[in-house]
């Protein structure tokens, strides 16, 4: 039986076609993006230039304008709960972190049962590094960042510290600067914002680009330092703001300006290494600013109501944006709701691409409160209805207060302090309009690469129109006596309590809060343990159990 003769004339086109297909498969294989998450500490709504602040932030502003500004972005009202939400994708009521923050000698933290964002990303092949503030538990080594998914951690464990000598005061005084669990003694008098920037630059420049990078840069800035010297910045930064006449606010502006320089330096490192073309930068505050001398600091949330550690808009509506060349339609302002718990599934979507299939299924499988929004934020696609229609602000069963936003309506109840409106303190001269022109701004050319962005946003400050404040605004809402209801679409500054006008809406939101309450686990807070006193451990804050 004669065989079939395969000639080279027939085989060659087949081989060429096969090789072309293989080449196409190789060249179109998706490389996961690098992810740089920059978390500012206690940065208020009115503390960035793109919100119209008198404090100039040229690097932050240009990255924001050339990216996607999250104009209706919510965070938790204070440090630990927000950081836990970023790491877990869960509301604090589901991790036990809903009441206040972790004090230095309290033996608890983000539960070890939680799979953290860096653990998820490591499973996808990422190198994961953390720089800066942890504040999610340090009483046992198991709770430290390098044991929660990070390949390395250089930074501190507590809620605040001195910016120069790196000692932290929280009932006791101890040194709080560490590298992978070991005390890092050799950095006295190095300003922490610059120190953490140098570490971030080193990580980026030494990164093996055969693997994607996740860098969580959790800055100390702009949180106050220890009580005796709360607002700390190098003099050259303070001198940038002679037009701010209020001394604490001028010093605070110096802290913000150093943070802004850090953002520019990190971006420059990405450019220098060629990594910027495949990088997502997330910038977020952890909560509203401490205004009205709270924490002896001088942040500002104007014109929003309230302060850090409250459920008023000034405490929970945060500064946030995403910058990346991977955005399909940059230069946008997103006015829909985004919550800090959404970062975990959103960044997993960005990292996995089509591998993170149905976000509803995946979020359910991962037991998350966060919603994956990478298609919406990136502009690649998106659902007809924005996926987040409600935000649980918090339920604190210890201090007995809570709040929720559903649609346009916000309900708060219980003992919520600091209910005023606080404009920037002191006099600001007209020099503010030009004083920022001489600042070093490494991202100066960002907009030049994308001229269409300048046309779409124009670099104009994004402001909030509150309308006229009624004379009785401070008396309209007394949430410790009865729940207050606000229509945020028409009343973003919470001037008008409409609870008596819309009792059916009050009832509907109360019922939703009850549903959340029934899923809540108890607060994990523990009494302070004197065995954690750093004087028992060589003068260092470190695990003691």
Image (cartoon, rainbow, N blue to C red):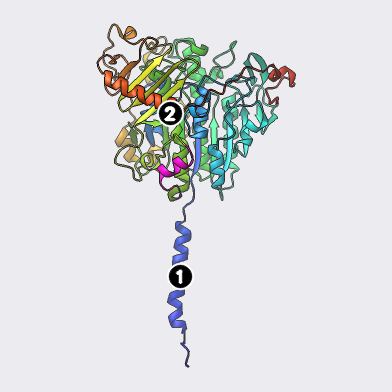
Position of 324 compared to 204: left or right? left
Count of numbered marks: 2
Magenta residues (range): 355-367
Please rate how many residues cluster around mark 1, counting C-alpha atoms within 10 Å: few if below 14, some from 14 to 19, many from 20: few
Which is more toward the observer, 426 or 369?
369
Q: Characterize the magenta stretch by its predominant secondary structure.
A: helix
In the picture shown, does residue 335 fall above or below 316?
below
- Residue 464 appears in view: no
Q: Position of residue 121 (x, y in %)?
A: 53, 43
Please rate how many residues cluster around mark 2, counting C-alpha atoms within 10 Å: few if below 14, some from 14 to 19, many from 20: many
Q: Position of residue 68 (x, y in %)?
A: 38, 36
Query: Does the residue at mark 2 contact the one at mark 1 (Cβ under 8 Å)?
Result: no
Looking at the image, which residue sits at the far front?
Answer: 518
Q: Which residue is mark 2?
A: 58
Q: Which residue is mark 1?
A: 18
Question: Is tag 2's residue or tag 1's residue first in the polypeptide sequence?
Answer: 1
Q: Position of residue 177 (x, y in %)?
A: 65, 26
- Residue 155 appears in view: yes
Residue at image position (48%, 25%) is 286
Discs 2/1, front: 1
Find numbered disc 2 in the image and state the secondary structure of the residue it sits on.
helix
Position of 10 compared to 166: left or right? left
Q: Is residue 363 magenta?
A: yes
Label 2 to label 1: alpha-carbon separation:
51 Å
Position of 365 compared to 407: left or right? right
């Amino acid at each position: 039986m004669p065989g079939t003769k395969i000639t080279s004339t027939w085989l060659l086109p087949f081989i060429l076609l096969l090789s072309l297909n293989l080449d196409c498969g190789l060249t179109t294989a998706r490389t996961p993006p690098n992810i740089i998450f920059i978390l500012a500490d206690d940065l208020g709504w009115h503390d960035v230039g793109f919100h119209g602040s008198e404090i100039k932030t040229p690097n932050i502003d240009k990255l924001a304008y050339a990216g996607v500004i999250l104009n209706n972005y919510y965070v938790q009202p204070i440090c630990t709960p927000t950081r836990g939400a970023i790491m877990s994708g869960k509301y604090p009521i589901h991790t036990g972190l809903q009441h206040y923050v972790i004090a230095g000698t309290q033996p608890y933290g983000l539960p070890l049962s939680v799979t953290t964002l860096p653990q998820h990303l490591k499973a996808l092949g990422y190198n994961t590094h953390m720089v800066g503030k942890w504040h999610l538990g340090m009483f046992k080594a198991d709770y430290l960042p390098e044991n929660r998914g990070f390949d390395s951690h250089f930074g501190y464990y507590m809620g605040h510290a001195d910016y120069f000598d790196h000692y932290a005061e929280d009932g006791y005084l101890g040194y709080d600067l560490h590298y992978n669990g070991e005390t890092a003694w050799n950095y006295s008098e190095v300003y922490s914002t610059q120190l953490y920037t140098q570490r971030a630059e080193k990580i980026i420049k030494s990164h093996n680009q055969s693997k994607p990078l996740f860098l969580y840069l959790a800055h100390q800035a702009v949180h106050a330092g220890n009580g005796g010297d709360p607002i700390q910045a190098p003099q050259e930064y303070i001198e940038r703001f002679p037009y701010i006449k209020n001394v604490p606010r001028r010093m605070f502006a110096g802290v913000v300006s150093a943070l802004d320089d850090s953002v520019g330096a990190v971006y420059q490192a990405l450019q220098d290494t060629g990594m910027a073309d495949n990088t997502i930068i997330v910038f977020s505050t952890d909560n509203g600013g401490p205004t009205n001398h709270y924490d002896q600091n001088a942040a500002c949330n104007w014109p929003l109501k309230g302060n850090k550690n409250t459920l008023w808009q000034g405490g929970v509506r945060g500064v946030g944006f995403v910058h990346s060349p991977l955005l399909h339609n940059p230069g946008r302002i997103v006015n829909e709701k985004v919550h800090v718990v959404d970062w975990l599934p959103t960044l997993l979507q960005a990292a996995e691409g089509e591998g993170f299939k149905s976000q509803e299924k995946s979020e359910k499988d991962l037991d998350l409160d966060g919603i994956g929004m990478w298609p919406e934020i990136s502009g690649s696609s998106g659902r007809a209805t924005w996926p987040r229609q409600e935000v649980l602000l918090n339920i604190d069963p210890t201090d007995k207060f809570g709040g929720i936003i559903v649609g346009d309506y916000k309900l708060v109840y219980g003992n919520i302090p600091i209910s005023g409106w606080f404009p920037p303190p002191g006099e600001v001269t007209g020099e503010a309009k030009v004083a920022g022109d001489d600042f070093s701004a490494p991202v100066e050319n960002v907009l030049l690469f994308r001229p269409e962005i300048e046309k779409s946003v124009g670099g104009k400050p994004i402001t909030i129109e509150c309308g006229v404040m009624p004379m009785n605004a401070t008396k309209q809402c007394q949430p410790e006596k009865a729940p207050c209801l606000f229509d945020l679409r028409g009343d973003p500054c919470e001037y008008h309590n409409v609870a008596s006008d819309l009792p059916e809406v009050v009832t509907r939101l109360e019922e939703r809060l009850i549903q959340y309450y029934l899923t809540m686990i108890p607060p994990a807070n523990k009494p302070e343990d004197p065995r954690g006193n750093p004087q028992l451990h060589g003068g260092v804050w470190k695990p003691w159990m």
